[in-house]
Image (cartoon, rainbow, N blue to C red):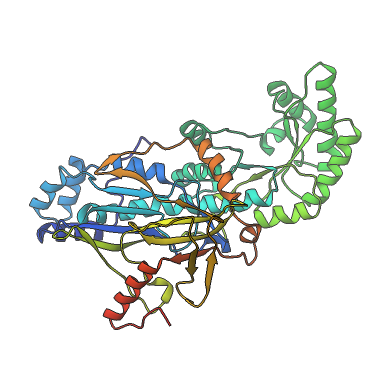
Amino acid sequence: MSKMNLTLLTDLYELTMMQGYFESHSSETVIFDVFYRNNPCGNGYAITAGLEQVIDYLKNLRFSPEDIAYLRSLGIFHEPFLEYLKSFRFEGDLYAIPEGSVVFPHEPLLKVIAPIMQAQLVETAILTIVNHQSLIATKSARVVQAARGDGIMEFGLRRAQGPDAGIYGARAAMIAGCIGTSNVLAGQLFDVPVKGTHAHSWIMSFPDEYTAFRKYSQLYPDACLLLVDTYDTLRSGVPNAIRIFKEMRESGIELKNYGIRLDSGDLAYMSKKARKMLDEAGFPDAIISASSDLDEYLIDSLKTQGAAITSWGVGTNMITSKDCPAFGGVYKLAAVLDEKTGEFIPKIKLSENTEKITNPGNKKILRIYDRETGKIRADLICLADETYDESQDLIIFDPLETWKKTKIKKNTYVLREMLQPIFLKGECVYTSPSVMEIRDYCTQEKNTLWEETKRFANPHNVYVDLSDKLFKIKSDLLEQMGRHSLSL
């Protein structure tokens, strides 16, 4: 399964629209925004991920002779268009919020500025990359939060929806704060820690549990984590593990990274009993790890019950985001370049559903931080050429309920522009950090959230507001199209 050419990783209608633009001689430059409308998992925020794979995709966007031969075989594409595809390259601009950032609904995570045929083609691939990794990163951030500082190991590969979901899901989980993955290929590809213990089959393949433990301890004395629930956790598993640890100590082996893993039963009760047994035997620093269909709710509950667990292995529920299987990111046209004036003409998509009305124009995002605490006050979507002065008062308002206004006093806030240039005129101008560097950055990002935004139930929503100028453009476009203005 070698590296695939992803150029045809697209919906057919992207190509049929491209041919339509080609035959109508349409080469106008456009702006498309990637954004989402609702936080996944009922969360108060999301974590954006997948940018490095988007970069790789755009760098390698080429129609091979085999691709063109396949498209010809469909019988719907004309020869002049197929000839054009032979030299196709992405020559546009891409702006993006860095991976690992906390993000919120309706703000552009990525902004594509390119000739319309190029911008149209890349829609599907960008969405499938960003939607998947952002979903798993967001879910993983919740699991990491529930563990309250304990280590979370990702080990969902066997339950992921195929190899790619397992590999890039592991990447996203690491970005969100996991300490390691069981996925060896992900470890190799992304240079992240790989971790693991052994299965019940290891125990069952030996004459008895003690013999299995002893052999494992001989093989891996520096990482001896024993699975103790194959037969009887408290009457067999833990006592046999203690026996092994005593033998290791007596033979002069320095005990480190050692302990037990629980994979079934009442984890709160079992872990407390096991902790007492280990402590009384002289092993107070032995790790107690747990698995068994964990998610953020169960981990949070176990922590509240005082479970003596300090390391967690999370698989199915995290790698699949089982309770929320889709991120919901969309790709919408925001502006078209007027070649005569050199100005972008804002475009808007209407809907009977207010939240599906898009924000028009060439935009940027300014994140507003409280200067004293470093916490996020709000995000402000404004036009790309707008400027603000931190030495002046800043008034922001809810774009749907416009009477809700907040005055942020001068010199009490800090502004940060979130969208960064990634490609300019088809050339990549950005170097992706390593996954572990993104993980550290993501940890810092999560620390900019107020605790109220991070709670699992009914989190406080961070305000995402529009500037006065952008709000007026949006309102004017609605008026022109016979819709009521957003203002009162």
Q: Residue 158 location, x and y as percent? A: 54, 44
Confirm whether residue 76 shows in the render: no
Question: Residue 249, position in %: x, y?
Answer: 83, 21
Residue 146 versus residue 383: which sits nearer the camera? 383
Q: Is residue 43 visible?
A: yes
Q: Is residue 429 left or right of residue 181?
A: left
Q: How many marks?
A: 0
Residue lying at the far left in this picture: please name it: 80
Q: Residue at x 76, y 42 (%)?
A: 229
Q: Quadrant of residue 444?
A: top right
Point out the residue furthest to the right here. 280
* Residue occupying the point 77% across, 24% down: 255
Q: Can you give x and y, in whole percent of width and height, for residue 16 in the image?
A: 19, 59
| Closer-to-camera residue (7/306) | 306
State the residue at coordinates (84%, 41%): 274
* 400 vs 395: above or below: below
* 347 versus 137 height, above or below: below
* Of residues 263 and 459, the one drawn nearer to the viewer in this rendering: 459
42 lies left or right of 134: right
> Residue 438 appears at what percent x and percent y?
51, 40
In the displayed orientation, state which residue is furthest to the top: 252
Between 486 and 278, the one lying in front of the other is 486
Q: In this view, does 229 lie to the left or right of 177?
A: right
Q: In which quarter of the image is the N terminus?
A: top left
Q: Which residue is drawn at 63% across and 48% down?
A: 144
- Assign the C terminus to one quadrant of the image: bottom left
Q: Is residue 23 left or right of residue 223?
A: left
